[in-house]
């Protein structure tokens, strides 16, 4: 265990809790602590930092929320590998996000869905195909390629799961409520976009995407995914133009 007598905080414009949090993170790094390593007791840390234990506990609570610190019976506090997206998932509320943030998150989702195409086919098994087919068969689609939220979530979550990448799967759980919120909030704007895409023959359903997967057609799936998210892509692009012109839709 490294020395903690150098943790004394400085006078900065940032809050005391912010300084304590920064000092603790620097202490973990400088002493090369690994997940499972013990962390000094609260009393010793408070003395080394020169702060009240209430201040220290608030800083530690932030690290606990990120999954970095854990209290264990008879071992005290130990360092853990942080949940990189866990903290974001706890606090992300689409109701308090601004237009630009919502549009950026939707754009990121579209980019990510396109980016995982190869990973889906690299990891695809016959079992995955059967599971995806079952989801498609029980899925509920409304008019103009709009799906019941649970059907949308199950289908795309399965695609994320097939990649085998835990970070990608976590992101799907984070972005899902944002997608539902935007779709409900702007449904009157999505409808004409979808009608025009349908007229142009550019709507691609879950069933069509599934058939590309079943037939192991990577290129078809990639093009189909672009068309499947055409509604979101057009909505984000057009609203970014409106946003840059000072026009908003009253989120």
Image (cartoon, rainbow, N blue to C red):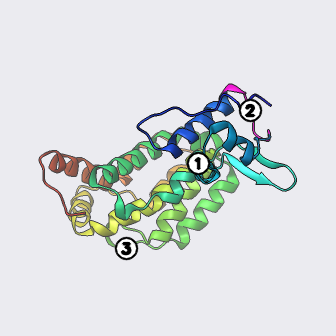
Residue 90, compared with residue 114, is above or below; it is below
Q: Residues within 10 Å of mark 1 (few under 14, many from 20)?
A: many
Q: Position of residue 242 (x, y in %)?
A: 15, 50
Label 1 vs 2, first from the N-terminus: 2
Label 1 vs 3, first from the N-terminus: 1
Secondary structure at numbered mark 1: helix
Residue 214 appears anywhere in the view:
no
Distance from the alpha carbon under mark 2 to that under mark 3: 53 Å
The stretch in magenta equals 30-37
> Which quarter of the figure has residue 141?
bottom left
Q: Nearer the viewer, mark 1 or mark 3?
A: 1
Q: Nearer the viewer, residue 208 or 182?
A: 182
Q: Which residue is mark 2?
A: 33
Residue 88: numbered disc: none
Q: Nearer the viewer, mark 2 or mark 3?
A: 2
Q: Which residue is mark 1?
A: 59
Lateral position of residue 125 relative to residue 115, left or right: right
Q: Which residue is mark 3?
A: 142
Report if residue 204 lies within the magenta region.
no
Q: Nearer the viewer, residue 24 or 8?
A: 8
> Which quarter of the figure has residue 6?
top right
Distance from the alpha carbon under mark 1 to that under mark 3: 48 Å
Q: Position of residue 187 (x, y in %)?
A: 27, 68
Residue 218 appears anywhere in the view:
yes
């Amino acid at each position: 265990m490294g020395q903690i007598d150098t943790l004394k905080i400085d006078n900065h414009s940032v809050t005391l809790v912010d300084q304590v949090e920064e000092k603790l993170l620097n202490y973990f790094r400088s002493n090369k602590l690994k997940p499972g390593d013990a962390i000094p007791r609260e009393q010793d840390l408070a003395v080394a930092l020169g702060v009240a234990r209430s201040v220290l506990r608030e800083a530690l609570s932030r690290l606990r929320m990120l999954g970095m610190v854990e209290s264990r019976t008879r071992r005290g506090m130990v360092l853990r590998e942080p949940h990189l997206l866990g903290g974001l998932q706890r606090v992300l509320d689409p109701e308090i996000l601004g237009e630009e943030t919502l549009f950026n998150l939707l754009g990121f989702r579209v980019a990510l869905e396109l980016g995982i195409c190869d990973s889906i086919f690299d990891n695809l098994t016959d079992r995955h195909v059967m599971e995806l087919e079952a989801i498609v068969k029980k899925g509920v689609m409304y008019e103009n390629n709009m799906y019941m939220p649970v059907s949308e979530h199950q289908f795309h979550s399965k695609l994320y799961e097939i990649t085998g990448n835990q970070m990608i799967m976590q992101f799907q759980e984070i972005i899902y409520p944002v997608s539902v919120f935007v779709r409900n909030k702007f449904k009157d704007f999505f409808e004409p976009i979808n009608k025009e895409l349908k007229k142009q023959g550019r709507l691609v359903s879950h069933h069509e995407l599934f058939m590309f997967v079943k037939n192991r057609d990577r290129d078809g799936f990639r093009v189909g995914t672009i068309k499947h998210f055409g509604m979101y892509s057009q909505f984000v692009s057009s609203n970014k133009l409106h946003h840059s012109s000072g026009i908003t839709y009253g989120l």
